Image (tube, grey):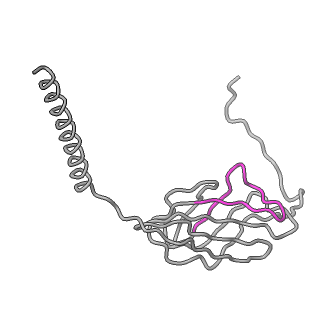
Amino acid sequence: EIDAMRLYKKQRGKRGMKKRIWSLFLVVVMAMSIIPVSEVYATEKQSNTYVGENYQVTFIVDSSWDNAYNASITIQNTSTDVIDNWCIQFPMQQKIDNIWNASMIKYEDGICKIKNAEWNQDIKPGESVSFGFTAAGDFTQFPDKYSILSKKIQVVPENFGIEYSCDKNTN
């Protein structure tokens, strides 16, 4: 009689465990059916290369989803001179929401102006720098032109002066 009672309790415990597992499973299924899920579209990488005077720019769409995409841009120095303190400008339909390895200076009238980060400001001959960003909106087309805005200019020292003034002495 005692063995029969133990066996009954053991079987009842197994049935109770099965009921709890099924209940947990049903709760998870119900929760998943009411949580909204945004659609993510897997796309193949798209790329385009622009060749400018003494530089080359490669624009790659790394990934895209509903109403946004990630892209990267690589600037390669094809000249024999260093590109000092680079800054690049190009037309783009979408606004950049997030950027890494560079800084957004300005976005106005569909023109992006992007400047180097502190650690990648110069591009030596034959080398390149890359930066990436997330843009709001669906990708529609690659920029048709890029301009490197960093140029060395020789100046005559006699044409410039330095003026120093002290507005407040905090000694």
Residue 79 colored magenta?
Answer: no
Span of residues in magenta: 112-132
Total labels drawn: 0
Q: Residue at x 90, y 57 (%)?
A: 158
**Horizontal placement of 101 versus 160: left or right?**
left
Specify the quadrant that holds the C terminus. top right
Q: Nearer the viewer, residue 125 or 149?
A: 125
Is the residue 117 above or below the residue 46 in the image?
Answer: above
Specify the quadrant that holds the N terminus. top left
Image location (x, y in percent) of residue 164:
77, 42
Q: Nearer the viewer, residue 160 or 120?
A: 120
Image location (x, y in percent) of residue 3:
15, 23
Q: Which of the 4 image quadrants contains residue 169? A: top right
**Horizontal placement of 48 versus 35: left or right?**
right
**Horizontal placement of 60 versus 139: left or right?**
right
Q: Residue at x 83, y 56 (%)?
A: 160
Is the residue 152 above or below the residue 171 in the image?
Answer: below
**Horizontal placement of 117 versus 78: left or right?**
left
Residue pushed farthest top?
2
Image location (x, y in percent) of residue 50:
69, 77
